[in-house]
Image (cartoon, rainbow, N blue to C red):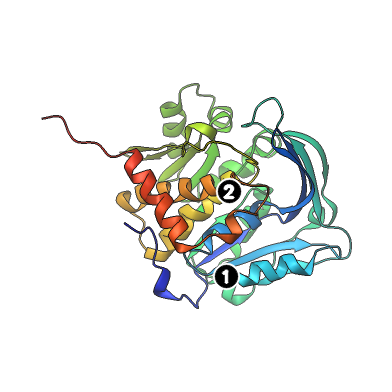
Amino acid sequence: MSPHSWETGDVHLKILVVGSVAYDAVETPAGKRESQLGGSASYFSVSASYFTKVGLIGVIGNDFDSADRAMYESHGIDTSGLIEANGKTFRWSGEYLDDINTAVTLDTQLNVFGDFEPELAEAHASAPYLFLANIDPALQLKVLNAMKSRPKMVANDTMNLWIDIAKPALEELISKVDTLLINEDEAKQLTGEEHLPDAAKAIISMGPNSTVIKRGEYGATLFGRDFSFAAPAYPLKKVIDPTGAGDSFAGGFMGYLASIDKVDEESLRTAAIVGSTMASFAVEDFGLDRIKSLTKSDIDERFNAFVNLTRFNPLT
């Protein structure tokens, strides 16, 4: 079974992603990297690029390495919306030493990202699928409102900071999207509910048709209005760097849906497994090192391993 349409050769932009492009300094039990390409838009766009044509909206500084832009373009990613501003690229430093599922932020330098104002060209504003990666909800709303028409599917991600300091704008955004991707702690923080099904029900009551609650090493759970589906995490021998796992999940999830151009219960279930497949690759090396160099057979093999993880016979 194959999760994607590799031979479609998309030339038209199918997904627009708006988010951060950064250089990360990361330390995990497996080692340390002083400066590696990261940011939500990077992980999402590279992951989604294996399935469909992606456009990236973001901002970089004068210090951005031309080899990193070339890497995006080698994946067919439209970087015309990746604007260079005078200054330094967003930088983040963190470590995963006590808990591999939880980053401890050591330093954040917003640099040019602090003044980021997304601007959409006509081709961007016509994209049928839109992913609003983890940025200020006011900017996410601005992008959604700038689309020429309502995309076929809009999904967004968020974080505890925005729940703390921008909850009204975030709630307005959530009321306008189809799917919210959020981690377990944030879902509980957003809704005030302690149990996952109750938190999901509360999120869906805000407006989305579905929510994906990310649970780290326990996988992800997809909740719809009248169904739920658990996507397991792949049993890896070693997790090297979990930094981009959630955004890589989102890239696989949205990339698959855009590639088949269908959003229904069965498609969402498969998309959750595709997302888990891409997240499992992302954590196998530092930064984008693993996920940027995948082959069709790598993805097919891992996807089929997920199918086997969850395959069983009914009771007779």
For the N terminus, give its image quadrant: bottom left
Describe residue 312's horizontal placement relative to residue 72 as left or right.
left
In space, the residues marked 2 and 1 are separated at their CA atoms by 29 Å
For residue 50, side relative to residue 38 (left or right): left
Of 160 and 279, the residue lying toward us: 279
Residue type of the residue flagged with mark 1: Ala
Residue assigned mark 1: 125
Residue 219 in view in this figure: yes
Q: Residue at x 32, y 42 (%)?
A: 308
Q: Position of residue 37 (x, y in %)?
A: 73, 55
Which numbered marker is on residue 282? 2
Q: Residues within 10 Å of mark 2 (few under 14, many from 20)?
A: many
Between 49 and 165, which is closer to the camera in this rendering? 49
Q: Position of residue 251 (x, y in %)?
A: 53, 55
Residue type (three-letter) at the residue carrying disc 2: Ala
Residue 153 seen in the current view: no
Q: Is residue 265 above or below residue 159?
A: below
Residue 142, image quadrant: bottom right
29 shown above or below 83: above
Residue depicted at x 51% and y 51%: 278
Q: Nearer the viewer, mark 2 or mark 1?
A: 2
Residue 301 location (% of width, % of height) = 40, 53
Q: Circle 1 sits in a helix, a strand or a loop, which is it? A: helix
Q: Where 39 falls versus 60 (above or below)?
A: above
Query: What residue is rendered at 47% in x and 36% in y?
Result: 235
